Image (tube, helix red, strand yellow):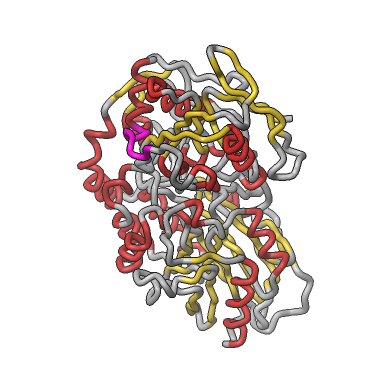
Amino acid sequence: MRTSMMAAACALAVSAGPALADYKLTILHTNDFHSRFEPISKYDSGCSAESNAEGKCFGGSARLVSAIAEARKRSANSILVDGGDQFQGTLFYTYYKGKVAAEMMNLMRYDAMTVGNHEFDDGPEVLRGFMDAVEFPVLMSNADVSGEPALADVLRKSTVIERNGEKIGLIGLTPEDTHELASPGPNISFSDPVAAVQAEVDRLSAEGVNKIIVLSHSGYGTDQRVAAETTGVDVIVGGHSNTLLSNTHDRAVGPYPTVVNGVAIVQAYAYGKFLGELNVTFDDAGKVTAAAGDLLIMDASVPEDASVVSRIGELAEPLDEIRAKVVAQSAAPIEGSRDVCRAMECEMGNLVADAMLDRVADQGITIAIANSGGLRASIDAGDVTMGEVLTVLPFQNTLSTFQISGQTLLEALENGVSQVEDGAGRFPQVAGLRFTWDSAAEPGARIVSAEVMMDGAYGPIDPAATYGVVTNNYVRNGGDGYKMFAGDGKNAYDFGPDLADVTAEYIARNAPYQPFTEGRITRR
């Protein structure tokens, strides 16, 4: 299977004398799976059984099972790890929470995973239930969980596993701003990744462990910083930024592995579309002398394991009636990919923002702000099913309306464009509003101009005026850095209709929906 992809030149080679005892290890890895147990389309959304039979689909647990089995046959010594965010993304998570992820990961015999921010979407208790169900350690080094009863006795910073007589240290890492991205609760504090990793490396090294792998759900940029600012790390298996690292794929962001300070960094995009396969050679002192590999695409050339197809079909039965319902039609594909929506105005952002504003316009609300992190897929042309809408908007967020000053609105827009370089989900998609931002300016001073629609025409935001705004309950309560929206005194109502339902109804009323962008957001 795709063995030609492994012919890429070694991306990490260190001149050294003959090793006394070379140790070879294959690291198989996934990240940001987001409950895509069934095959997905090229848009990372649902893919019909007919399209799958025609060879047009990717991924799914049944393909991963087959690919992992074949990869293990190619290697005499391998591990399988995950970079976090198994939770959230489809109705499977909405209905089963972490139970299906636990079952499939146990079936594939994972050796460890790190905690992703979405593992906290339903609080520490759901994460604990998942941890009790899996047969491997779940790790997170850069957080203090001692005050959280659900996790204090089970969530470890690192672990040591043995393969072919050698000890391998595994360290977990999660986003430092998880408290803004999910719902970890008040009892967990997150800390700087560099210091946390170095502390665990030092501890493991003191115990005689000289092969150390970081499982990092912190993003490609942070992984490079951790590699540059720590000593003793050999490999970082990444996640969170959904980065495609490859030596053969034309959309790759960087090489596989990316080498920083002698550390091999890998990441496998997202949604089970690829399986990462990194072959590492250590000398007798634990120093990496070679690291090479690439991503294996989970396309139709990878056979689906029949027993897993059957099991996923059983689990899908309660979901099928909801997912199969056709709610509208789209005249063209609706672009909702994260690399577009987290950097600029996008078609899916306009759709969702317009749908929110349309629903509450009769309440005196004139502005809608949708966080791009809440948009999880594109939709193809033709019939639009409720399953597709729920794949785009899987979080069960509700509409929230509130009132803020123009000054606070400007602060919110600054927050929205403050982390574009990192692909952060806080990037705002808007309706009833347009703005220009300067990417060369420092965060906090990037908004060049901002105007609101009043009486059919755009005019400058008045910092002293009061504006009615609609967003989702996650953002209204401070998620994605929108702390200026949280708190009392804003005449807020957080319990409106489900955002997915609102969007589905809007598309239906405007069917066949015509996707568009119109200059609501411009970049200088």
In the picture, measured across the screen, residue 321 lies left or right of residue 294, that is left
Up the image or down, 2 lies above or below 57; here it is below
Image quadrant containing the C terminus = top right
Up the image or down, 357 lies above or below 137; here it is above
Estimate the x, y position of residue 102 in percent, counting from the top left.
33, 60
Asked whether residue 496 is drawn in magenta, I would say: yes
Can residue 489 be seen? yes
Asked whether residue 139 is drawn in magenta, I would say: no
Q: Which residues are magenta?
A: 493-500
Closest to the observer: 457 or 523? Answer: 457
Estimate the x, y position of residue 16 in percent, counting from the top left.
77, 75
Identify which residue is drawn at 53% across, 50% down. Answer: 296
Identify which residue is drawn at 67% across, 82% down. Answer: 285
Up the image or down, 26 lies above or below 399; here it is below
Identify which residue is drawn at 38% across, 27% down. Answer: 503
Estimate the x, y position of residue 162 in percent, counting from the top left.
48, 79
> Predominant secondary structure in magenta?
loop
Question: In the displayed image of the protein, which residue is found farthest to the bottom?
Answer: 207
Can residue 382 be seen? no
Estimate the x, y position of residue 462 in percent, counting from the top left.
62, 27
In the picture, measured across the screen, residue 178 lies left or right of residue 131, that is right
